[in-house]
Image (spheres, rainbow, N blue to C red):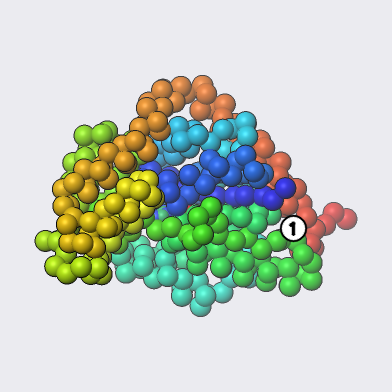
Amino acid sequence: METVVSGIRSTGKLHLGNYYGAIQNFVKMQHEYNCYFFIADLHSLTTHPTPADLHGNIKQVLVEYLAAGINPETATIYLQSDVPEISELYLYMNMNAYLGELERATSFKDKVRANPDNVNAGLLTYPVLMAADIIIHKATKVPVGKDQEQHLEMARTFANRFNRLYSKEVFPEPYAFNYSENLVKIPGLDGAGKMGKSEGEGNAVFLSDSPEVIRKKVMRAVTDSGPTAENQEKPVEIQNLFDIMKVVSTPDTYTHFDNLYNSCQVRYGDLKKQLAEDIIIATTPIREKISDIANDAPYLRQVAKHGAIKARESAQRTLKEVRETIGFRSF
Ligand code: TYM
């Protein structure tokens, strides 16, 4: 059975982008593959969270994984920091990752631009740690959003380079995965870029948002004054709303509003109302479970402990092979 690995950083509440780019696939894949889903708490250290914030955010992701329907009996759920073998593999992989290729990574360049005062080495080697996360379980499928495509390409490069260096097929090639044909990128509500945890307030709809908050955010989404000619190309902010509708609403709803747009009869108020209700339908089952799970500390502890044991077993197997391949052998 193929192995699947994916993770989400512990940087805050999960939003629709995380759901449609990643979690929705996790929930389905757990029944078809050998799955490892983790909380990327080491990756979230690049922005120096306070211990209290870090701890709270780790718990938030764990709770939302469970609320979304990942079953800890079916998939292995764990904290990245509970599996020290990942950090050791990261160290080995760093020896074969070159400064030039790391500096060229789009996400690195974006982060340097956004925050020039915090260009730390952890940020530079972020894709190496991500590769270690994936290949530690010899995964071949990695359910992620479109923004992670380049990181997956780098993971393949690092895995292949290791294999070549030691003339041994230790790691298979991992590929980004989504059940739909293409990887998805859920846009934000502000008319600009993608939906993100750290974008401006109102840009993201969180899985834990109440129906009132969802309605308010969607109704405030940026629009224009409407199409002026039939079958006109949609401007970015309108296309964004349609893109969200495509994943959240039924195909009939999407087609209905697309036809209205193309015949210049669309009323954005109606479109937004429908979109908000469809988001509420999609997120309510998750939201309703969040607080119950969050209040069950013994359960969360047990899930994390059980997951760490299972993840370490797999990681130790790989690391033993890696150490022997490198030349760390007993006398
Ligand atoms: P993070 O926390 O930024 O995002 C978690 C997942 O959510 C997806 N995502 C989106 N998908 C579609 N549209 C969006 N607007 C959107 N925003 C976020 C991301 O693509 C991702 O799948 N580097 C990873 C975490 C990670 C990881 C790994 C993933 C660390 N190690 C190993 C897979 C395998 C990240 O940035 O997560």
Residue at (51% x, 78% y) in the render: 100
Would you say 266 lies left or right of 289 here? left
Picture coordinates of residue 145, whole percent (x, y):
46, 56
Q: Which of the pair 72/21 is nearer the observer?
A: 21
Residue type at mark 1 is: Val
Q: Is residue 248 visible?
A: no
View extreme (bottom): residue: 100
Q: Could you tell me if residue 327 is visible in this image?
A: yes
Q: Quadrant of the C terminus?
A: bottom right
Asked if residue 107 lies left or right of residue 203, the reply is: right
Residue at screen point 70% across, 45% down? 314
In this rendering, the answer to whether 307 lies above or below 162 is above
Kindly indicate the quadrant of the structure image that contains residue 57: top left
Location of residue 54 (image quadrant): top left
| Residue extending furthest toward the left | 225
What element does badge 1 sit on? helix
Q: For label 1, count other residues whose C-alpha is less than 10 Å away and answer few (under 14), some (14-19) or many (20+).
A: some
User: 317 above or below 93?
Assistant: above
The residue identified by callout 1 is 322
Residue located 29% across and 48% down the image:
204
Residue at the far right: name it: 331
Image x and y of residue 91, in percent: 61, 60
Q: Position of residue 42 (x, y in %)?
A: 49, 49
Residue sitting nearer the eye, 310 or 116: 310
- Image height check: is 74 above or below 109? above
Q: Is residue 9 placed above or below 113 in the rendered structure?
A: above
Between 249 and 63, which is closer to the camera in this rendering?
Answer: 249
Q: Position of residue 101 (x, y in %)?
A: 52, 75
